[in-house]
Amino acid sequence: MLGPTIGDLLPAAVGVALSPLPIVAVILMLATPQGRTNGAAFAVGWVLGLVVVLVLVVALAGGADSNGSTRTGVDWLKLLLGVLLVGVAWKQWQSRPHDGETPELPKWMATLQDFDPLRSFAVGAALAAVNPKNLALAVAGGATIAQAGLSAGSDAVAILVFVAIASVTIVAPVVAYLALGEKAADTLDHLRAWMAANNATIMTVVCVVLAAKLIGAGLGGLTD
């Protein structure tokens, strides 16, 4: 059924939405000379990156509801993705800044003012679909949809719901800046600073919680 499936998707979608570095990147991008165009391109790339991953996973894992071997494969996939997220959480915790240290952002963020719309689009898509944490959660979301054995229409609705929730933290700053301009700048800058300072902690907590859910779901399916 569609309702329970969407409920199962919510944690993974929220986990993707709570990605500090993409949020920091889009806010910094909005402050550049081509901020409006590049910010919109980044958001479109993010959305399409998630859509592509979800559609591919649903297509490849389709039939999981009626095929026992495929269902077992999906359960193993969830278990492995959960273990991957444990590794991501550990790496993030190890890299957290200590008291008095300034968190370091990726070097490419210093070149945002030189971006054009195409590069902004590509970076948005990569952060959504190639970043290990987001890729793992999107794959898990796609596997959950496929395993539910829904109709094609319901699959599409579930994918759209996942992408909408996972994209709200990226699309909302762009919409706010396009609508309010400089009036939104201070609020977005405070959000950027907080996200940058707490990136490692946020990522660690999100990854641990979602890893527990995926491992539990995988083990539950394998032992059912």
Image (cartoon, rainbow, N blue to C red):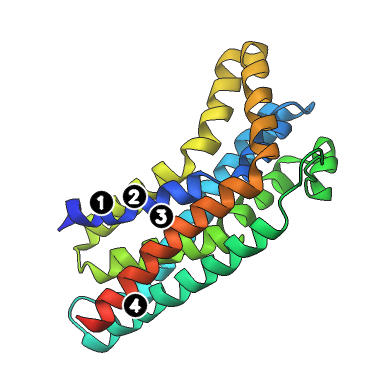
Query: Label 3 to label 1, Cα distance in Å?
Result: 10 Å
Q: Are marks 1 and 2 in contact (CB under 8 Å)?
A: yes
Please identify the residue farthest to the bottom as the structure is shown. Answer: 69
Q: Are marks 4 and 3 in contact (CB under 8 Å)?
A: no
Query: What's the amino acid at mark 2?
Result: Leu
Query: What's the amino acid at mark 3?
Result: Ala
SS type, badge 1: helix
Q: Which mark is residue 12?
A: 3
Q: Are marks 3 and 2 in contact (CB under 8 Å)?
A: yes
Query: Label 4 to label 3, Cα distance in Å?
Result: 15 Å
Q: Which mark is residue 7?
A: 1
The x and y percentages for residue 159 are 35, 54
| The one of 99 and 54 positioned closer to us in this rendering | 99
SS type, badge 3: helix
The x and y percentages for residue 120 are 70, 44
- Report the residue marked by disc 2: 10
First of labels 1, 4 by sequence position: 1
- Report the residue marked by disc 4: 74
